[in-house]
Amino acid sequence: MDDNPSFETIAEDMAFLDEWEDRYRYVIDLGKAMPPLDPAQKTAATKVDGCASQVWIVPRREGARIDFDGDSDAMIVRGLIAVLRALYGGKRADEILAIDAPAAFARLGLDQALSSQRSNGLRAMVARLRDTAARAAA
């Protein structure tokens, strides 16, 4: 991964933010710091269905580890992709499959703050990443 902060760093930073607006801005800033996806990678195969915004996830294998790049036309979703990169990026398939993403997002307080459409999109992104890990583990 590039300079994306660790999930623990994100969790610690979010713990200091009392207002949802501050957390929202923090997540957006994470997305702004993430490099954009190469337009050539924004294909039907990399597009994540089930998201209100346009979202692309491009997984890649690095030895036994899986990492991914992603992008969205919505800044908050780019931020959620950055959080997912911190949660899943650079891990082995079995580690990815063992992660309880809903609990992780609840720890950040994002489970209560996202709209139902954003929550559905987040679940679709998690499902895509878990599917990639399951195929790699098979």
Image (cartoon, rainbow, N blue to C red):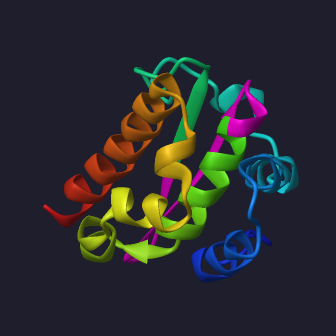
Q: Position of residue 103 (x, y in %)?
A: 36, 64
Residue lying at 42% horizontally and 21% vertically, measured from the top left:
49
Q: Along the horizontal axis of the image, is 134 left or right of 63?
A: left
Residue lying at 40% horizontally and 21% vertically, measured from the top left:
50
Residue lying at 80% horizontally and 41% vertically, measured from the top left:
36
* Front in this rendered view, residue 117 or 19: 19
Q: Along the horizontal axis of the image, is 16 left or right of 119?
A: right
Q: Position of residue 24 (x, y in %)?
A: 75, 47
Relative to 31, is 94 above or below? below
Q: Along the horizontal axis of the image, is 108 left or right of 125?
A: right
Relative to 60, is 131 above or below? above
Q: Is residue 62 magenta?
A: yes
Report the number of discs. Answer: 0
Q: Is residue 30 magenta?
A: no
Q: Main secondary structure of the magenta part?
A: strand
Q: Residue furthest left?
A: 138
Specify start and end residues of the magenta stretch as a single range.
59-76
* Front in this rendered view, residue 74 or 63: 74
Residue lying at 43% horizontally and 66% vertically, measured from the top left:
104
Q: Position of residue 61 (x, y in %)?
A: 45, 63
Quarter of the image for residue 97 reads bottom left
Q: Along the horizontal axis of the image, is 102 left or right of 88?
A: left
Quarter of the image for residue 14 reads bottom right
Q: Position of residue 117 (x, y in %)?
A: 48, 22
Relative to 3, is 74 above or below? above
Q: Which quadrant of the rendered structure holds the C terminus?
A: bottom left
Quarter of the image for residue 1 reads bottom right
